[in-house]
Image: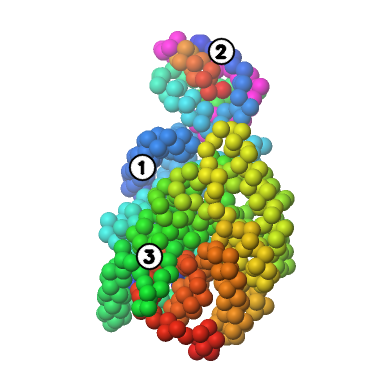
């Protein structure tokens, strides 16, 4: 299992546009990828679920990755978060 | 069955009819099997993704990032596992795919609306757009599936909906609850699509084929063979007339006694430019810029406006384009202006009256216009003028706008002409003072008539007595022209009277330089002009004849 925490910089948080990019990135991997915020956990491969997390600017979310390609996934997802949020 | 509505464009259409769906209102639940419906859903989904993908690529090519990202969001929604799971569960109840989609969208919308997140609440629209797209694809009779010219009927429809359909395949348009003055109606008229708006009653019967009689405002659903025959003949006659009119393209237009009258076009968006050029307009006499504001969710930026103005001006090359600055009031509601309801909107806070309070908005528009002025023959026109002070204010603002552009090192035509609309009795009566301050005038006959007669032109009770040829109106127009001519400025006429054949001779005698009409009426006007012989009549004689 791999994980990382991320401090959302973008004021709007996880909007449709960044959500799309996260989902597209996550789908490339077979690992289970989840995003956690305030005791709520959602599947990073599901766009509506991601948006319903209601993650906003200044929130600290945690990304949890479990699977064969978890190392690669970690690198890629970190990059996607940096770029979009 | 026959239905009646308001005329939008007078052509005739006979053919198959399909309903354009853009809401879930008419979707009903029916029984089916999971195997069939899940297959239908999968196919529709694949088609939708393909269409969005194409639009995504097109948007990227046009450097339209915003549109591209919306397409990308739509694709993500379609592929979303939750969305697909909910629909799959519903389909297992052996119901039709359309209803499953409707239900899924409604359920998800509710969830979003209940969340404390404004952004998500707005995404409900995206979700519904995707749902509607799927249903349109599933519907055997969707306009998106038409392969031959077809009549389209819609409960509501917007310009954005219309431009997605291949124009060649639209035989005719029936807009059940749309006003004939709505933007889509104006566009439809410009594109010469036989159409009718604002039907007296809703159409509930099964839709197979139909006839549109644009001139009489009649729609016949599932007509008899005799009716089809009858209208076939009428249609041929109409097409013959249009063919004859084409001969007046690219011709020098003069009356029999050698007088000229230019024929310009009225438009509400750059989408009508092709129609303007195709109908050989001598220029654009009225570009209703408020439609840019009406089609925007908030005040359009200087760049957004500049792009639209530039498109029009460039395409017209060395022909004039007259853009009227935004003409908004309580009756032409634009939400973000936050105008209060009025009991007398026609006599209220509208046109130039708003410009002091909305100075920033006006300056932004002026700056956009001045920037566009380097691309061609652009002129601007101010609506609803009633005093000298208003004109002086506008000119002051023009200087401010130019200073702003100078500071930003942006080019503009320093001598861009500024004109005013003469559409009130007050401006008509002080015309001598006004013409000294402006470069041209345009007489707005619709409003001038109603203010002079003290009658609401939309009041059906006054229909019988509303006389657009009232001697008071004609005298006023004649007066305006006489006084304006002393200062040698260009006089235009826009409004319904401009395309009235009986009035063309009158306008020529008054010394009007140009009339401005909807693009589909231009050639007819040109033909009429060539048939006029002024016979050196006097104005009084003319007025007597008209009444």
Mark 3 Cα shell of 10 Å, populated few (<14), some (14-19), many (≥20) = some
Q: Are marks 2 and 3 on the same chain?
A: no
In the picture, measured across the screen, residue B240 lies left or right of residue B379, that is left
Percent coordinates x, y for residue B160 in the rendering: 46, 51
Percent coordinates x, y for residue B436 in the rendering: 63, 61
Is residue B153 located in the magenta-colored stretch of the structure? no
Q: Quadrant of residue B7?
A: bottom left
Which mark, by number, is residue B192? 3
Could you tell me which secondary element the residue under label 3 belongs to? Answer: loop
Is residue A61 located in the magenta-colored stretch of the structure? yes
Which mark, by number, is residue A4? 2
What residue lies at 63% left-to-right and 39% top-to-bottom? Answer: B403
**Cα distance between the residues tagged 1 and 2:** 37 Å
Question: Marks 2 and 3: which is nearer the front?
Answer: 3
A67, B284: nearer the viewer: B284
Q: Quadrant of residue B488?
A: bottom right
Mark 2 Cα shell of 10 Å, populated few (<14), some (14-19), many (≥20) = few
Magenta stretch? A45-72
Which mark, by number, is residue B51? 1
| One can see residue B513 in this view | yes
Colouring mode (rainbow / by chain / secondary structure / one colour) = rainbow
Q: Quadrant of residue A29?
A: top left
Taking B471 as reference, is B261 above or below it? above
What residue lies at 46% left-to-right and 15% top-to-bottom? Answer: A76
């Amino acid at each position: 299992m791999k994980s990382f925490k991320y401090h959302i910089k973008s004021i709007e948080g996880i909007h449709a546009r960044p959500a799309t990019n996260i989902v597209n990135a996550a789908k490339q991997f077979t690992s289970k990828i989840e995003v956690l915020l305030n005791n709520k956990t959602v599947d990073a491969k599901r766009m509506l679920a991601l948006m319903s997390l209601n993650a906003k600017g200044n929130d600290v979310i945690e990304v949890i990755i479990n699977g064969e390609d978890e190392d690669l996934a970690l690198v890629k997802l970190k990059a996607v978060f940096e770029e979009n949020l | 069955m026959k239905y009646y509505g308001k005329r939008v464009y007078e052509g005739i259409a006979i053919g198959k009819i399909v309903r354009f769906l853009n809401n879930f209102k008419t979707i009903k639940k029916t029984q089916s099997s999971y195997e069939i419906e899940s297959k239908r859903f999968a196919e529709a989904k694949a088609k939708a993704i393909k269409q969005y993908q194409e639009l995504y690529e097109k948007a990227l090519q046009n450097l339209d990032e915003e549109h591209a990202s919306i397409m990308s969001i739509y694709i993500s929604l379609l592929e979303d596992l939750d969305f697909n799971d909910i629909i799959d569960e519903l389909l297992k109840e052996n119901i039709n795919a359309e209803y499953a989609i409707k239900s899924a969208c409604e359920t998800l919308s509710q969830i979003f609306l209940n969340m404390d997140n404004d952004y998500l609440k707005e995404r409900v629209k995206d979700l519904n757009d995707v749902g509607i797209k799927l249903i349109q694809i599933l519907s055997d009779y969707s306009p998106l599936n038409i392969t031959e010219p077809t009549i389209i009927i819609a409960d509501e429809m917007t310009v954005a909906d219309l431009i997605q359909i291949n124009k060649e395949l639209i035989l005719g348009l029936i807009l059940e609850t749309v006003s004939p003055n709505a933007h889509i109606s104006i566009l439809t008229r410009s594109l010469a699509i036989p159409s009718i708006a604002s039907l007296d009653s809703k159409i509930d019967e099964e839709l197979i084929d139909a006839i549109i009689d644009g001139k009489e405002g009649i729609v016949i659903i599932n007509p008899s063979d005799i009716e089809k025959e009858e209208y076939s003949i009428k249609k041929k006659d109409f097409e013959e007339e249009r063919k004859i009119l084409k001969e007046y393209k690219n011709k020098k237009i003069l009356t029999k006694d050698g007088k000229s009258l230019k024929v310009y076009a009225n438009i509400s968006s750059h989408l009508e430019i092709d129609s303007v050029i195709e109908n050989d307009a001598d220029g654009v006499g009225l570009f209703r810029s408020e439609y840019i504001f009406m089609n925007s969710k908030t005040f359009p930026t200087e760049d957004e406006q500049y792009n639209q103005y530039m498109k029009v001006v460039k395409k017209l090359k060395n022909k004039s384009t007259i853009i009227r600055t935004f003409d908004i009031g309580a009756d032409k509601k634009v939400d973000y202006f936050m105008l209060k309801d009025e009991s007398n909107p026609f006599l209220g806070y509208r046109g130039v009256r708003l410009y002091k309070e909305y100075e920033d908005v006006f300056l932004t528009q002026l700056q956009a216009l001045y920037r566009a002025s380097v691309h061609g023959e652009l002129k601007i026109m101010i609506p609803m003028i009633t005093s000298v002070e208003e004109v002086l204010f506008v000119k002051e603002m023009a200087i401010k706008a130019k200073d702003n552009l100078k500071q930003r090192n942006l080019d503009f035509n320093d001598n861009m002409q500024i004109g005013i609309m003469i559409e009130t009795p007050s401006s008509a009566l002080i015309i001598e003072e006004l013409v000294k301050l402006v470069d041209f005038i345009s007489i707005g006959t619709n409003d001038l008539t109603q203010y002079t007669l003290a009658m609401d032109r939309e009041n059906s009770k006054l229909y019988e007595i509303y006389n657009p040829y009232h001697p008071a109106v004609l005298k006023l127009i004649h007066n305006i022209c006489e006084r304006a001519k002393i200062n040698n400025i260009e006089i235009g006429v826009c409004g319904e009277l401009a395309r009235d054949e009986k009035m063309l001779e009158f306008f020529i005698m008054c010394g009007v330089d140009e009339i401005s009409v909807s693009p589909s009426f231009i050639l007819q006007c040109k033909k009429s002009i060539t048939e006029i012989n002024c016979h050196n009549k006097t104005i009084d004689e003319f007025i007597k004849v008209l009444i």
